[in-house]
Image: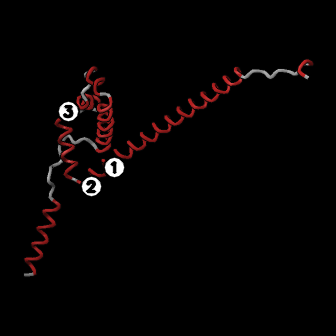
Amino acid sequence: MRNFVLVLLGLMFWSCAEKVVEKPENLIPKDKMVLILHDLAVLNAVKTSFKTTMEKNEIEVMEFLFEKYEIDSVQFSQSDLYYASVPLEYQLIYEEVESKLDERKSILEDRTKKRNDSARSKNREKVKDTLKRTKKPEKEPTDSDS
């Protein structure tokens, strides 16, 4: 009975270690996959906001990415499937993508804040200048007023 339990445990460990999806020959490296998925997220957001512009310019998101990163749809699909079959790797990839997106968001928010602050400052200066120009000088008392 003890041997049966050991064999059963051995089979369970062996089956858990078995790869669900074989590593493709043309696997996209993790760092490149992070860049592709980052760009995909950004372009999908742009596509949502500027759909007509992208259609007008005939920009297809996936075709653009395939050309930019010199990959094809099969290579991308196989790599994505492989990484998805290794959950910890896939999670790390998406955490890096999320980190890059957060960093980009922070940069854009800082730029927007600086631009808005600059615009407010210029507006305040214009208001001050306008007030100075429209302010009428006070009359000096004359002898007839006393």
- Residue indicated by mark 3: 72
**Residue 112, x across and y down, in percent:** 49, 34
Q: CA distance from mark 1 to mark 3?
A: 24 Å
Q: Amino acid at mark 3?
A: Asp
Label 1: element kind? helix
First in sequence, mark 1 or 3: give its number: 3
Q: Residue at x 45, y 36 (%)?
A: 108
Q: Residue at x 82, y 21 (%)?
A: 139
Nearer-N-terminus badge (3/2): 3
With 57 as the anchor, is 123 left or right in this view?
Answer: right
Which quadrant would residue 59 be assigned to in this image? top left
Q: Is residue 143 left or right of residue 101?
A: right
Depth order, front residue of 132/104: 132
Q: Tell which tag, 1 or 3, sits nearer the viewer.
A: 1
Residue at screen point 26% across, 30% down: 61
55 or 9: nearer the viewer: 55
Residue 20: image location, x then y, percent: 14, 53
- In the image, which disc is placed on residue 9? none
Of the image marks 2 and 1, the number of the one nearer the N terminus: 2
Mark 2–mark 1 distance (CA, rounded to whole Å): 10 Å
Q: Position of residue 43 (x, y in %)?
A: 31, 33
The residue beneath circle 1 is 95
Q: Quote the CA–CA distance across marks 3 and 2.
A: 25 Å
Q: Residue at x 62, y 30 (%)?
A: 124
Q: Amino acid at mark 2?
A: Leu
Q: Which mark is residue 88?
A: 2
- Whether residues under marks 1 and 3 lie with C-beta atoms below 8 angstroms apart, the answer is no
